[in-house]
């Protein structure tokens, strides 16, 4: 895979730099075979509550067994661990769960075996638009969409009734911030200095009709568009919440869990968060779900369709695996609608395909209200993935450095941010 200028040079150099400290310690592991001749495939998974392990067992055959190894909790630490080992040509990784922002970087560095065209066609046909977009780099699907997460706007029914806001119609960020501020409520978001904050920034910019970057096929000569009318509108929303009574006290350190706690507390009013949050309350506070309402992600601009965040996991096969063909067959099984549903039922991380929602005799309907499942799917088709580029880690780091804390965001933030990111990309500044 080539980019404008030198094919993959800077990305590979960066990833090899990550590997330098770990190459000597990393042994040349290989996918092993048991005494019976059955191959063991090793799948490096992101932490979850057992869904991937169950699917691995489902997809093991007489020819190969799939074992799982758990990656660190933090997405960037997952990236570093995988990159170090792949840069060392470690054959001990066969399959890996890859966070969407790192898809292009790994493929551009030459770490991923190309998906067979037949598998690409099958997955493109079955997957949601957002899932396909996040898995595609330079016109080719390079990882297999496994599960797809999105955010919706959660609200407390009791609060919106008191506030008198009509949730049957699309709502804007301005509306929910104002409603919460006037009625003693809080708007819970993810705005710590981490990737989750960039997810919010990206959704706000996308919801205003913009993108963080375009022309990504030109590599370092991509076009940054943070400093734009859409960037200005995104900054205005963040600044408004940060300086509003609707801001939680922990706004600058809030991640998914803290946002969930705010929403579940006495001042809980509105929250944007991922699909799995729905089942986080009922076991602790029986009956709480009766007070949870849900609707499409808030609009950045009134009348302009929201672009909710896209998250999820795509499966990649290591180029250095000793069993690429078996690993590809395993990936096809893992990403089948039936196994996407199995994973969703256990973890709350929803399928990457509509068929996954309807698999196994509509098993998900027993856990989630049908309108909520419909909203998840609607949101996934409207979702805006973060910019697919090998340089996403630098872009994300630059956004975190210049947009945090939320209270510091102002009219000059988009321009300052774009200049800083451009300097980072071209080696004139360090993160």
Image (cartoon, rainbow, N blue to C red):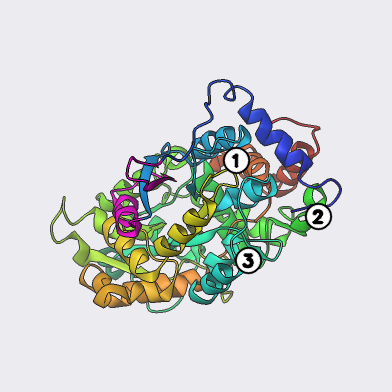
Secondary structure of the residue carrying tag 3 is loop
Neighbour tally class for label 3: few under 14, some 14-19, many 20 plus, Cα within 10 Å:
many
Q: In terms of image quadrants, where is residue 395?
A: top right
Mark found first going from the N terminus, 2 or 1? 2
Mark found first going from the N terminus, 3 or 1? 3
List the single residue furthest toward the left. 286
Note whether 179 is above or below 369 in the view shown. Answer: above
Q: Residue at x 40, y 68 (%)?
A: 336
Instruction: Give the number of the disc on residue 400.
Output: 1
Percent from the top left, x then y, of residue 87? 63, 35
> Magenta part of the protein: which range?
33-62
The residue that label 3 is drawn on is 208
Q: Nearer the viewer, mark 3 or mark 1?
A: 1
Q: Is residue 16 left or right of residue 8?
A: left
Q: Is residue 55 left or right of residue 411?
A: left
Distance of mark 2 from mark 3, alpha carbons?
A: 24 Å
Q: Residue at x 69, y 66 (%)?
A: 139
Please name whichever residue, 176 or 101, is drawn nearer the observer in this view of the structure.
101
Q: Magenta span has 38? A: yes
List the single residue furthest toward the front. 36
Q: In terms of image quadrants, where is residue 74?
A: top left
Percent from the top left, x then y, of residue 78? 49, 39
Q: Magenta span has 9? A: no
Q: Residue at x 62, y 60 (%)?
A: 205
Is label 3 in contact with label 1 (beta carbons under 8 Å)? no
Q: Residue at x 27, y 67 (%)?
A: 157
Instruction: Give the number of the disc on residue 218.
Output: 2
């Amino acid at each position: 895979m080539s980019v404008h200028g030198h094919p993959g040079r800077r990305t590979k150099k960066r990833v090899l730099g990550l590997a330098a400290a770990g190459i000597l310690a990393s042994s040349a592991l290989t996918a092993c075979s048991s005494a019976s001749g059955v191959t063991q495939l090793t799948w490096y998974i992101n932490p979850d509550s057992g869904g991937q392990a169950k699917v691995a067992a489902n997809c093991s055959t007489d020819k190969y067994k799939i074992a799982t190894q758990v990656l660190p909790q933090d997405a960037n630490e997952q990236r570093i661990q995988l990159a170090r080992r792949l840069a060392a040509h470690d054959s001990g990784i066969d399959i890996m769960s890859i966070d969407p922002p790192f898809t292009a970087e790994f493929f551009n560095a030459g770490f991923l075996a190309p998906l067979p065209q037949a598998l690409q066609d099958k997955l493109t046909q079955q997957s949601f638009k957002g899932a396909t977009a996040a898995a595609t780099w330079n016109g080719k699907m390079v990882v297999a969409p496994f599960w797809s997460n999105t955010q919706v706007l959660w609200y407390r029914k009791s609060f919106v009734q008191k506030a008198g806001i009509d949730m049957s119609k699309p709502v804007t960020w301005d509306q929910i911030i104002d409603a919460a501020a006037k009625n003693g409520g809080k708007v819970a978001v993810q705005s710590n200095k981490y990737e989750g904050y960039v997810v919010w920034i990206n959704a706000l910019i996308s919801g205003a009709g913009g993108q963080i970057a375009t022309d990504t096929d030109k590599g370092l000569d991509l076009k940054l568009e943070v400093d734009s009318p859409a960037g200005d509108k995104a900054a205005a929303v963040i600044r408004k919440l940060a300086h509003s009574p609707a801001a939680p006290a922990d706004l600058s350190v809030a991640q998914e869990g803290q946002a969930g706690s705010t929403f579940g507390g006495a001042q809980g009013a509105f929250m944007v968060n991922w699909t799995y949050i729905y089942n986080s309350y009922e076991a602790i506070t029986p009956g709480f779900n009766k007070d949870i309402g849900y609707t499409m992600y808030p609009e950045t601009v009134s009348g302009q369709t929201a672009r909710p965040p896209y998250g999820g996991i795509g499966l990649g096969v290591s180029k250095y695996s000793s069993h690429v063909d078996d690993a590809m067959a395993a990936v096809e099984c893992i990403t089948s609608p039936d196994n996407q549903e199995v994973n969703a039922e256990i973890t709350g991380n929803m399928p990457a395909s509509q068929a996954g929602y309807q698999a196994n005799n509509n098993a998900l309907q027993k856990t989630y209200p049908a309108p909520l499942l419909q909203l998840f799917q609607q949101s996934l088709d409207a979702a805006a993935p973060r910019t697919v580029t090998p340089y996403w880690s630098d872009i994300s780091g630059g956004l975190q450095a210049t947009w945090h804390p939320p209270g510091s965001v102002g009219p000059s933030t988009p321009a300052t941010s774009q200049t800083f990111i451009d300097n980072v990309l071209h080696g004139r500044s360090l993160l």
